[in-house]
Image (cartoon, rainbow, N blue to C red):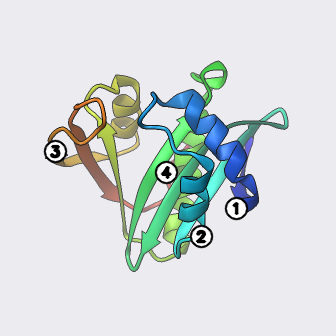
Amino acid sequence: MHVQEASIAHAQLLASMHAQCFNTGAQWDQTAITALLSSPGVHAGIVMEEDQPAGFIMLRTVVDEAEILTVCVLPEYRKRGLAQQLLAWGAQVAQHKGAQTLFLEVSVNNQSARILYEKKGFEKLGLRKKYYEDGSDALVLGRACQTASP
């Protein structure tokens, strides 16, 4: 498995993967992903498993901060350490771009992601009430931006 840099040319693929990983209303379409990838400081990486795209991460760096915008691993590839690979890649990119702190939001209902983020050193910084389309709250998590180990 390896992570490769994604570009606007990958927007349709990323939108397809996002649709398989998130509920309707939380899915990003090709237009949204293209707009994000066109924005300054936005980077995406696709994790490949046996030459097949299995998931991706997208993050934005601004000055000395980075925010993970989304992480998704296709259902058939979960529980193989791919999300950890994506987080490590994202942290490395953020650090290379000068970020000192890495942030993200995660639904209070997404137990598996919360466990992973805690394992990777993220700590609760805040709570956004009814942040998601389904009405669930979002935990705001952060950590220092040193490269996460896989």
Q: What element carries label 2?
A: loop
The quarter of the displayed image where residue 42 is located? bottom right
* Among the two numbered marks 3 and 4 on one chain, the one whose residue lies closer to the N terminus: 3
The amino acid type of the residue labelled 2 equals Ser
Q: Which of 17 and 104 is in front in this view?
A: 17
Dot 1 corresponds to which residue?
Answer: 8
Query: Is residue 85 shown above or below 147?
Result: above
Residue 45 relative to residue 36: left or right: right
The amino acid type of the residue labelled 3 equals Leu
Determine crowd level at label 2: few under 14, some 14-19, many 20+ residues with C-alpha closer than 10 A: few
Dot 2 corresponds to which residue?
Answer: 38
Query: Is residue 61 shown above or below 102?
Result: below
The quarter of the displayed image where residue 142 is located? bottom left
Say which mark, if any, is on residue 136. none
The amino acid type of the residue labelled 1 equals Ile
Dot 4 corresponds to which residue?
Answer: 148
* Among the two numbered marks 3 and 1 on one chain, the one whose residue lies closer to the N terminus: 1
Q: Position of residue 105 (x, y in %)?
A: 32, 46
* Among the two numbered marks 4 and 1 on one chain, the one whose residue lies closer to the N terminus: 1
Q: Where is residue 145 in the image (x, y as percent from the top left)?
A: 41, 62
Q: Distance between the residues labelled 4 and 2?
A: 26 Å
Dot 3 corresponds to which residue?
Answer: 127
Residue 142 visible in the current orientation: yes
